[in-house]
Amino acid sequence: MCPKWYIVTLSNPYMPLPGGYMTSPRMAPTVVGMGLLELIPESTILAFQAANAASSGQVKGHANYVYNPYTQKTEIGRFGQKANTSSLLVQVATAFQQDMGITSYVQPFKSVHGQSQWGAIGDTSGFDIADSILNAVTFYVRTLAVPARRNVTDAAVQRGELLFTQMQCASCHIPTMYTGVDITFPSMSNQRIHPYTDLLVHDLGAGLADNRPDYLAGGSEWRTTPLWGIGLLEKTNGTPFYLHDGRARTLEEAILWHGGEAQNSRDQFTKLSKSERGAVISFLQSL
Ligand code: HEC
């Protein structure tokens, strides 16, 4: 939850970018409940996609399918702001490699600028960290708990929750689903969870576009951000920064940036009375 910007770039950020290279400023995302998100069955995510496709509405999310360099398979994407990573092990290993230049058994090659992140160029003589360190850090991230909700019986919070559903925010920020089974994590298996995401990518319009496609996610598509824990960002981060690049400083601003498939929901929010808008914000702050 570091309130810093970092730039994802395929080139050396200190050199003028030659034509064709794309940049996209990103916030570091909240990392609670990651193991639970990893355990949402693929069939659940695909059922959300099928429901979108079958509905006559504006919301048409779809799954991203991405390459897993460790299993060497194409898998459904779950993590990252364009759902471009399928597993926490790869997410953590790639963060070590891409963000810190540290190689491991999952990402064995040094990241060389100008090369694809799966490129086979670089120093392959031994990994920078032991397998046990990568596994322990992944275990840590996997098991970070979701904070308990607050003020759930508050009348404004309950009114806000109802409005959230009525404005169809919940068609993307899906409140409730169940995890599957991982025999190594019985405590996370078969859990009823409230992540407020569908793990699908949605077109949120030109205003939020970075025009940098990632596998099947287009330049204006983003994965629905899980909203669990969002009410504590202000407390943990001081000034909170919302949306993929941190452009929104308040929850209202974050909602008002929604366009594309979320345009209807956004427009309904602007038509609420002041006290109703306040109730929606109180609900979000209770998550
Ligand atoms: C079509 C799907 C969709 C709908 C409908 C939708 N959202 Fe979102 N929401 C998203 C996506 C995708 C993002 C991430 C956008 C980004 O980071 O650029 C997001 C981000 C957010 C964020 C910022 C989260 C963060 O931590 O940065 C908030 C708050 C939010 N939505 C609330 C709402 C509310 C309230 C509504 C209803 C008025 C709503 N959303 C409707 C898909 C949707």
Image (cartoon, grey):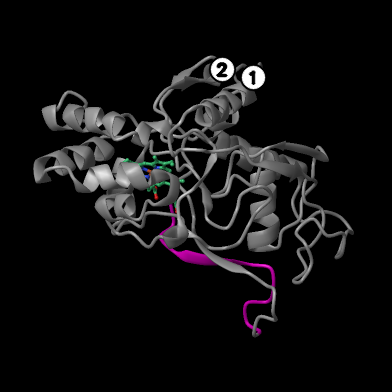
Residue plotted at (53% across, 14% down) = 190
Q: First in sequence: mark 2 or mark 1? A: 1
Residue type, numbered disc 2: Ser
Front position in the image: 162 or 154: 162
> Which residue is labeled 1 in the image?
182
Find the magenta span and give its range. Answer: 1-15
Residue 260 locus on image (x, y percent): 43, 50
- Label 2 and label 1: CA atoms lie apart by 6 Å
Q: Considering only vertical position in the picture, is 75 above or below 103?
A: above
Q: Assign ligand 1 to one image quadrant.
A: top left
- Residue 15, visible in the rendered structure: yes
Quadrant in the picture for the C terminus: top left
Residue 41 locus on image (x, y percent): 61, 23
Q: Considering only vertical position in the picture, is 218 above or below 41?
A: below
Q: Residue furthest bottom?
A: 16
Residue type, numbered disc 1: Asp
> Which residue is labeled 2 in the image?
189
Residue 249 locus on image (x, y percent): 29, 59
